[in-house]
């Protein structure tokens, strides 16, 4: 069993429900809605966590894509806006696992696979350059 | 052989001046020695880009018809000072807004103005015979204002404490978020690139010095507040604690929003990131030996910010090379260190100033007055009694 976070975008808002039922039944996957985004009533976006066997998850993602649902792997629920970041380093002070780090030339680097989602960096950033997807 | 400001400016005009950053000069001095390097290099550029709370802007809005003597003033919901003449105000960087609090404050209004955005101006007044209007509600841009200049009473600290938290609770400070039980250390400096650490005794930086200020050419206008030039120093003169500061002035209309940015320190307040670059003329060997300083020879103290007193415990004296290494050892425990001011942006500013000088767009201004070296700072005594 593995767990994975994915960001789904639907062409129509209504397409979400049957897709979810299908995922559970056909691919024996469990899923958890972490956040639903509403975008002009035209397009819906959903951040979900899916749990199951790796092969089943992969098959499930293929199924979603076949149904015109956009799928994006999310390593970390925090994102750094590069246009706002000034590489001050304040966020690295609170990131206990080193997911946010300064490079040798003192730029900020975000290793999103290391992130533990403690969300402390969101508050620590003076430029408000870090936002959380959930 | 000594050089004068005039000689260096003539070289700049001819496009012949040798200009390097305060980081680059270290290698040059190591290679050629102080004497030869002092002859070769004409100007060394220094810079810093970090949070500087004691900042703000003087603005003049021009007169409406009928005119108003602005009393209560807000700009995008941020209160500005109404105690100047009719349409003058001072907007402080740390003033929070009524609706968004510290998430949007004076510093954000200032950077929005510099970015050319329209801001919402609301003013009230009692109404007078000469200024009959009582209310005003309009939108203005930087280009609509008569004058708009930053006047920052205290910027570019010469050295500053590093911060740690010795308590068992997380604390939120202007030195960032500090984790409990000495979980981390923060520091705020450009170190060997920092302006006042390269001219520790203020031999070339004084009133009138022309500088890079927020992307514009500005000036040092006075000594900064809490000017502590009498601070403890090492044998060579480098400050061991917070020392001198500068008051800066510059035209907002010539600034770049990249170098003036609103900032928020969680649980503390709004601040402003200010980009400053100061050129140091290499007039003689003494000045060259000062700018050759390295992070390993610059020291500060790790101070426990969890102690709610003015005099906070000093845990350890550390060099900026140690702080930059990523961890510092305190009582046998290795503690992670993180910067708060951007060395990356400071380097960009030092390069930019360097280019201005090389292109002959920026000339040195000799100070018209030097700052006092023996200045100390006073505390504030709390006196009892309702009247005296
Ligand atoms: S605290 Fe914000 S601005 Fe500073 S380095 Fe981190 S993301 Fe960038
Ligand atoms: S959420 Fe926590 S673990 Fe993830 S990057 Fe931010 S501080 Fe680091």
Image (cartoon, rainbow, N blue to C red):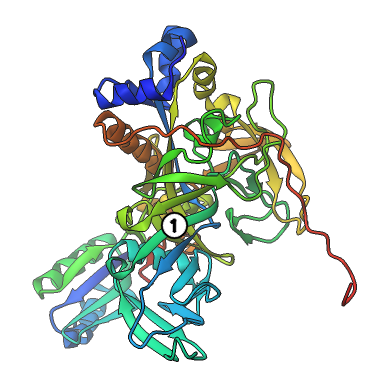
Q: Position of residue B312 (x, y in %)?
A: 76, 50
Give the chain of mark 1: B
Displayed quadrant of residue B383: bottom right
Q: Is residue A115 visible?
A: no
Answer above or below: position of B262 versus B16: below
* Residue at (34% x, 48% y) in the render: B216
Image quarter (top left, top right, bottom left or bottom right) of the N terminus of chain A: bottom left
* Residue at (30% x, 26% y) in the render: B12
Q: Is residue B146 visible?
A: yes
Asked whether B26 or B306 is in front, the reply is B26
Q: Residues within 10 Å of mark 1 (few under 14, many from 20)?
A: many
Answer above or below: position of B195 versus B187: above
Asked whether B122 or B296 is in front, the reply is B122
Q: Position of residue B166 (x, y in %)?
A: 72, 51
* Residue at (46% x, 59% y) in the render: A125
Answer above or below: position of B161 versus B388: above
- The total of numbered circles placed on residues is 1
Asked whether B155 or B262 is in front, the reply is B155
Answer above or below: position of B105 versus B180: below
* Residue at (69% x, 25% y) in the render: B234
Image quarter (top left, top right, bottom left or bottom right) of the C terminus of chain A: bottom left
Asked if disc 1 is less than 8 Å from ligand 1, the answer is no
Could you tell whether B185 is left or right of A7 in the image?
right
Could you tell whether B132 is left or right of B371 in the image?
left
Displayed quadrant of residue A68: bottom left
- What element does badge 1 sit on? strand
Q: Quadrant of ligand 2?
A: bottom left
Q: Which residue is mark 1?
A: B150
Q: Position of residue B130 (x, y in %)?
A: 45, 86
Asked whether B336 or A116 is in front, the reply is B336
């Amino acid at each position: 069993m593995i767990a994975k976070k994915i960001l789904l975008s639907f062409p129509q808002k209504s397409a979400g429900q049957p897709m979810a039922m299908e995922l559970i039944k056909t691919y024996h996957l469990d899923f958890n809605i972490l956040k639903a985004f509403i975008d002009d009533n035209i397009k819906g976006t959903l951040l979900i966590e899916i749990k199951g066997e790796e092969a089943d998850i992969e098959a499930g993602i293929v199924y979603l894509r076949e149904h015109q649902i956009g799928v994006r792997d999310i390593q970390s629920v925090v994102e750094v806006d590069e246009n706002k970041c000034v590489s001050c380093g304040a966020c690295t002070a609170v990131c206990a696992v080193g997911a946010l780090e300064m490079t040798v030339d003192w730029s900020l680097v975000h290793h999103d696979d290391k992130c533990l989602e403690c969300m402390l960096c969101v508050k620590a950033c003076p430029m408000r350059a870090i936002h959380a997807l959930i | 052989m000594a050089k004068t400001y005039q000689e260096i400016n003539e070289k700049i005009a001819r496009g012949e001046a040798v200009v390097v950053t305060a980081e680059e000069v270290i290698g040059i001095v190591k290679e050629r020695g102080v004497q030869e390097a002092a002859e070769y290099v004409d100007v060394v550029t220094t810079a810093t880009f970090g949070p500087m709370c004691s900042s703000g802007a003087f603005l003049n809005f021009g007169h409406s018809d009928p005119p108003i003597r602005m009393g209560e003033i807000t700009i995008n919901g941020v209160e500005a000072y109404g105690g100047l003449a009719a349409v003058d105000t001072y907007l402080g960087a740390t003033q929070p807004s009524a609706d968004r609090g510290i998430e949007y404050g004076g510093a954000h209004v200032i950077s929005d103005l510099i970015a050319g955005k329209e801001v919402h101006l609301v003013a009230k007044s009692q109404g007078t015979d000469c200024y009959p209007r009582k209310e005003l509600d309009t939108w203005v841009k930087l280009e609509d204002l008569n004058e708009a200049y930053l006047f920052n009473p205290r910027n570019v600290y010469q050295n500053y404490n590093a911060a740690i938290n010795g308590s068992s609770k997380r604390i939120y400070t202007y030195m960032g978020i500090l984790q409990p039980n000495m979980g981390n250390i923060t520091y705020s400096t450009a170190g060997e690139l920092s302006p006042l650490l390269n001219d520790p005794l203020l031999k070339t930086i004084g009133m009138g010095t022309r500088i890079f200020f927020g992307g514009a050419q500005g000036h040092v206008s006075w000594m900064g507040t809490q000017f502590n030039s009498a601070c403890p120093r090492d044998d060579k003169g480098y400050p061991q604690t917070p020392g001198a500061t500068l008051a800066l002035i510059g035209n907002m209309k010539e600034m770049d929003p990249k170098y003036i940015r609103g900032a928020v320190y969680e649980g503390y307040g709004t601040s402003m990131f200010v980009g400053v670059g100061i050129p140091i003329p290499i007039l003689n060997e003494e000045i060259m030996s000062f700018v050759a300083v390295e992070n390993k020879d610059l020291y500060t103290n790790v101070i426990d910010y969890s102690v709610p007193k003015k005099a906070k415990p000093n845990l350890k004296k550390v060099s900026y090379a140690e702080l930059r290494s990523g961890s510092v050892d305190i009582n046998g425990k290795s503690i992670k260190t993180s910067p708060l001011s951007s060395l990356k942006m400071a380097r960009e500013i030092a390069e930019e100033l360097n280019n201005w000088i090389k292109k002959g767009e920026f000339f040195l201004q000799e100070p018209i007055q030097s700052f006092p070296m023996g200045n100390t700072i006073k505390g504030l005594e709390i006196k009892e009694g309702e009247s005296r």
